[in-house]
Image: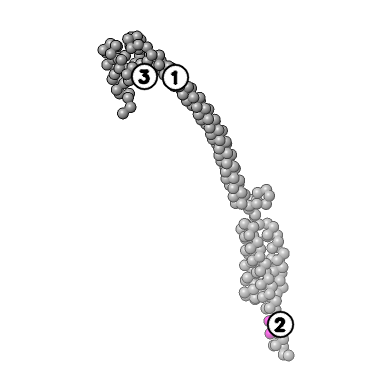
């Protein structure tokens, strides 16, 4: 092997080591930049300078290996300190980022609003249920009262019918001359009720014995109330 070949091989080895170290430094710098960006911060000028120096060293490969290795080692050793010195965003207690915390607070407020609305609806439904029960009870009471009134009305009507029937028999058994003066003093509704249960012959015998006006009024009332 000649001296030229040995020298060329040494240079290639030197350049290979320089390139390897430069790539390693570049990779470390990029990893530091990614870590800083993931944490939400902005990489300091020292990290950018370290990455720039590594890139330049890898691209030119003109500086001695000792200088490059020294700078690469310094950059590699300084990377953790640079990461530690990066200004991280303010983090809330519990390790949550401000945006996530704000989202959680908004969700909690919305949930509280929904809970309040649900409680309001439940209270309103309860009031409506109580009101409905009260209305149903009152309607049932009114229906019971109506039934009692109808029963009383039927009883009163039956009593009136029985009384009218009895009076019709009494006046029908009397002589027309004796019944006419008494019936003439009664109100028209009572006389009509009695006449309604008497025979037509009996009515025809009593009407002529009444005064003319009373007989006319009773005759008109009988004509309009008679079934057609």
Residue 12 seen: yes
Q: Secondary structure at mark 3?
A: loop
Q: How many marks?
A: 3
Residue at 33% in and 17% down: 202
The Cα–Cα distance between marks 1 and 3, rounded to whole angstroms, is: 13 Å
Residue at 33% in and 27% down: 227
Which stretch is magenta?
8-12
Q: Which label number is shown at residue 162?
A: 1
**Residue indicated by mark 3:** 198
Q: Secondary structure at mark 1?
A: helix
Tell me residue 138's x, y (percent): 52, 29
Q: Residue furthest bottom?
A: 1
Which image quarter holds the N terminus?
bottom right
At label 1, counting other C-alpha atoms closer than 10 Å, the crowd grade (few under 14, some 14-19, many 20 or more) is few
Earlier-in-chain disc, 3 versus 2: 2
Q: Which of the two marks, 3 or 2, is nearer to us in this view?
A: 3
**Residue indicated by mark 2:** 10
Residue at 69% in and 57% down: 84
Tell me residue 28's x, y (percent): 67, 67
């Amino acid at each position: 092997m000649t001296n030229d070949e040995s020298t060329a091989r040494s240079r290639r080895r030197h350049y290979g080591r320089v390139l390897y170290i430069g790539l390693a430094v570049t990779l470390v710098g990029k990893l530091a930049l990614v870590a800083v960006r993931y944490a939400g911060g902005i990489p300091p000028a020292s990290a950018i300078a370290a990455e720039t120096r590594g890139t330049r060293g890898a691209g030119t490969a003109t500086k001695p290996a000792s200088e490059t290795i020294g700078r690469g080692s310094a950059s590699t050793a300084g990377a953790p300190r640079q990461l530690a010195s990066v200004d991280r965003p303010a983090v809330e207690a519990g390790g949550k980022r401000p945006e996530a915390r704000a989202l959680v607070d908004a969700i909690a407020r919305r949930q509280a609003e929904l809970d309040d609305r649900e409680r309001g609806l439940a209270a309103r439904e309860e009031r409506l249920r109580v009101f409905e029960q009260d209305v149903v009870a009152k309607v049932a009471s009114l229906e019971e009262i109506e039934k009692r009134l109808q029963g009383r009305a039927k009883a009163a009507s039956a009593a009136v019918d029985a009384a009218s029937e009895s009076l019709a028999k009494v006046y029908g058994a009397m002589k027309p001359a004796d019944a006419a003066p008494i019936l003439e003093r009664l109100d028209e509704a009572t006389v009509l009720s009695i006449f309604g249960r008497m025979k037509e012959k009996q009515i025809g015998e009593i009407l002529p014995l009444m005064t003319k006006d009373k007989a006319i009024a009773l005759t008109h009332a009988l004509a309009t109330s008679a079934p057609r």
